[in-house]
Image (tube, rainbow, N blue to C red):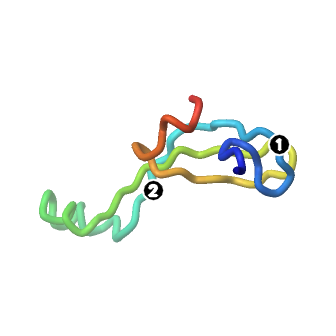
């Protein structure tokens, strides 16, 4: 079984670089519609790991499977 914290391309150990928030939807909706506009915005958070050898980036859903990821 492949170690999820090693790069699938070059097998180097991935480095945790933080949890990043991604915003999907119009930035104008919350501004124009206030709290109602927030209903039309999707926000997701991902734990991000980077390979120091080849630069590959791996995203993991924040809050799922964290027992397998050291950080």
Mark with earlier residue (2, 1): 1
Residue appearing at x 23%, y 62% in the figure? 30
x then y, percent, for residue 39: 19, 64
Q: What kind of element bears circle 2?
A: strand
Which residue, as the protein is rendered here, is positioned at the far top? Answer: 71
63 lies left or right of 9: left
x then y, percent, for residue 51: 77, 45
The crowding category of the residue bearing disc 1, from other C-alpha atoms within 10 Å (few below 14, some 14 to 19, many at least 20), is: some
In the picture, which quadrant includes the C terminus?
top right
Residue appearing at x 64%, y 36% in the figure? 16
Which residue, as the protein is rendered here, is positioned at the far left? Answer: 36
x then y, percent, for residue 11: 83, 47
* Residue indicated by mark 2: 22
Mark identifier at residue 57: none
Q: What kind of element bears circle 1?
A: loop
Quote the CA–CA distance across marks 2 and 1.
26 Å
Count of numbered circles on the image: 2
The crowding category of the residue bearing disc 2, from other C-alpha atoms within 10 Å (few below 14, some 14 to 19, many at least 20), is: few
x then y, percent, for residue 24: 39, 66
31 lies left or right of 36: right
Residue appearing at x 40%, y 43% in the figure? 63
Q: From what the image shows, is residue 42 above or below residue 71?
A: below
Whether pointer 2 and pointer 1 mark residues with C-beta atoms closer than 8 Å, the reply is no
* Residue indicated by mark 1: 12
Residue appearing at x 30%, y 68% in the figure? 28
52 lies left or right of 20: right
Q: From what the image shows, is residue 16 above or below residue 23?
A: above
Q: Nearer the viewer, mark 2 or mark 1?
A: 1
In this view, the residue in front, 39 or 49, is 49
């Amino acid at each position: 079984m492949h170690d999820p914290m090693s790069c699938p391309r070059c097998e180097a150990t991935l480095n945790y670089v933080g949890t990043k928030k991604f915003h999907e939807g119009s930035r104008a909706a919350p501004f124009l519609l206030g709290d109602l506009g927030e209903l039309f915005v999707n926000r997701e958070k991902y734990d991000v790991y980077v390979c120091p050898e080849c630069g590959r980036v791996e995203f993991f859903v924040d809050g799922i499977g964290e027992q397998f990821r050291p950080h």
